[in-house]
Image (cartoon, rainbow, N blue to C red):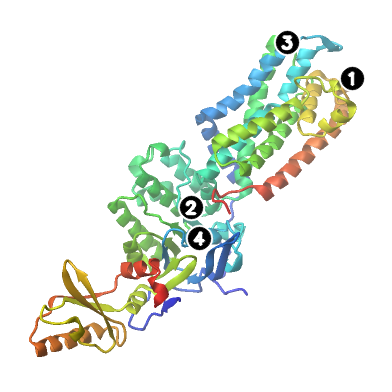
Amino acid sequence: MSPTTAPAPTTRPSLGWFRRTLRLTRAEFTLFVRYKTAWLFLAMPLVFLFVTLQMPDDEVLDGVGYAELSVAGVLGTIGVLVGIGHASNVFTARRESLVLKRLRVSGVPPLVIFGATTAIIVFFSLVVAAVMVGLIAVLLGELPRDPLMLALAVVLSAVSMTMVGLLLTPFVRNAEGAQMVSVLPMMVLLLMGGVFFPLDLLPDTVRQVVELLPVAPAAQLAQAAYTGYDVFGGYQGAGTPGYLGLWAAALPSLLVLLAWTLALALAVERRFRWDPRQP
Amino acid sequence: MTTTAHSAATDAPARATTGRPAVVVRDLRQKYGDFEAVRGVSFEIRPGELFALLGTNGAGKTTTIETLEGFRRPTSGTVRVFGENPYGQPASIRERTNAVLQGSGLLEDLTVRETVDLARDLAARPRGTEEVLEMVNLTDKRGLAVRQLSGGQKRRLDLALALVTSPEVLYLDEPTTGMDPEARIDTWRIVSELKKDGVAVLLTTHYLEEAERLADRLAIMHRGEVRVEGTLAGVLEGWGDRVAFAVPEDVRTADLPELEGAELSVETRDQALWATYTARSGDASERAHRAVGALLAWAGEHGTVLRHLQVRGASLEDVFLSVADGAADLL
């Protein structure tokens, strides 16, 4: 049965998705800067940077110490801290305070709302990465061999981990809960990232599984981008395949990250709750 | 069980409502597990018309609104906004509707101005920030952070955010809760203007005066069902006119006259016995006159006086309270 109602006039212009996302991203920037907890998530990767700098700098590859590899790996995990931490925190708080519902009833599409938060997390992840590269340059005298690959690792990690953060929100009832619950996946994913101990130490089968999770590929991409070594099959016997060779070697890791990002985004689309009222 | 008061030709002249309904709800049911929050609700709202949904807490009003807003899929029944199913807020209708939610939904870290600017920039056909702030009387507060606003000021900002997108359908869920009387009257004025501009409005409120002033039609919900529906005049008409007086001391209750088309009830108020005749049948515009005339004639014959004689129509409050008490079930 379809009751008759007034036909929708077609005169109304539709605002571009991109323009709206950009506008909401600007507001997200203001909100991020004014929100102190957000700064905490930015500071955490820097803390990890200094922790890993204290590791013994035994030479693992020709001219590359263990500390340098670990530090480079931290660059690939910025997204884990900022993405999971910030996204789960603010989206839970905004759902409970009806901010999300308010945006939805005024006609803002989900894609714009998710897009703006993802964009701001990507932006601040890149800022933190730039700060860390600066620190590494000063402290270790090393610059990344492939800045583009490094940036891509940071971006893909930030996007996929933002989706993980969004996926946590249906399971918690308030922002405090989100902060507590997000610590567990954060720690597990960080440990599985191969930053705090080399994945070479794991049994082969375990390592292969871990490398299919979204963090190890990002960390390996960052390490490869920083050192120029093909570390994707482990540190042992890693060579320097040159610019294009490194990208070819990086392809499986990139695909794993892209697949995770897509799968997580679809899961968010299906599972995300906008309304604090339990159904 | 459902009393539907259809408006007679003698009702207040119909508003200048035009066109086909913007909102249509047909036999809507919403179940949460075993609990049925909404049980077969139907109504329509035309452009320029305000439909008020009244009822006790938990009557199912907000669930009904949330279904129209597209957050809930009906368990059964149909809901249409501009002819489309609103579930999931399809692009074709989301830019033509807006709402004041029961809770606020404001970003506390932004200023008033930033809040309205953001909503304006995200809207497809916006009103200007200054215009909207002027409308809700927040111009002098525009530099303040939202967290510094009082409850009533936040409520006015909520209204501003609903206005800024120039909606054609507006859902107002208890929009004046927390407002001072002046802001409430301002809000009524704004809503009246919107109606003149052809906006279809759905209002829920606990202030019956608000519904009396604004509603073209209204429904009273109780436990998920519409118990009373119609125009204000139509609803009140069904509840009859009341003629009351203090029972003279020299008259026994049993000797009070029977009136055709009116029902007698006697109760003790302030240690005195009061008789109330409720006239429900016959010509609505003359039934009070006929009842009073018959009673005065009776008093003349018996040489007695009807002290404290009162005549009044039913108020929305009478109707509401009897629905809320469950007394409506007995009618």
Quadrant occupied by the N terminus of chain B? bottom left
The x and y percentages for residue A34 are 50, 30
Q: On the image, numbered disc 1 is attached to which residue?
A: A238
Q: Are marks 2 and 1 in contact (CB under 8 Å)?
A: no
Q: Relative to residue A3, is residue A78 depicted above or below?
A: above
Q: Is residue A24 visible?
A: yes
Mark 2 or mark 4, which is nearer the start of the sequence? Answer: 4
Q: Which residue is mark 3?
A: A140
Taking the view exactly as shown, the residue that stands out farthest to the left is B303
B71 over B300 or under it: above or below:
above
Q: Nearer the viewer, mark 2 or mark 3?
A: 3
Q: Is residue B12 visible to the viewer in this orientation of the structure?
A: no
Side of A144 relative to A177 (left or right) = right
Residue type at the position of mark 4: Ile
Q: Residues within 10 Å of mark 3 (few under 14, many from 20)?
A: few
Report how far apart the C-alphas of labels 2 and 3 lie in the structure. Answer: 54 Å
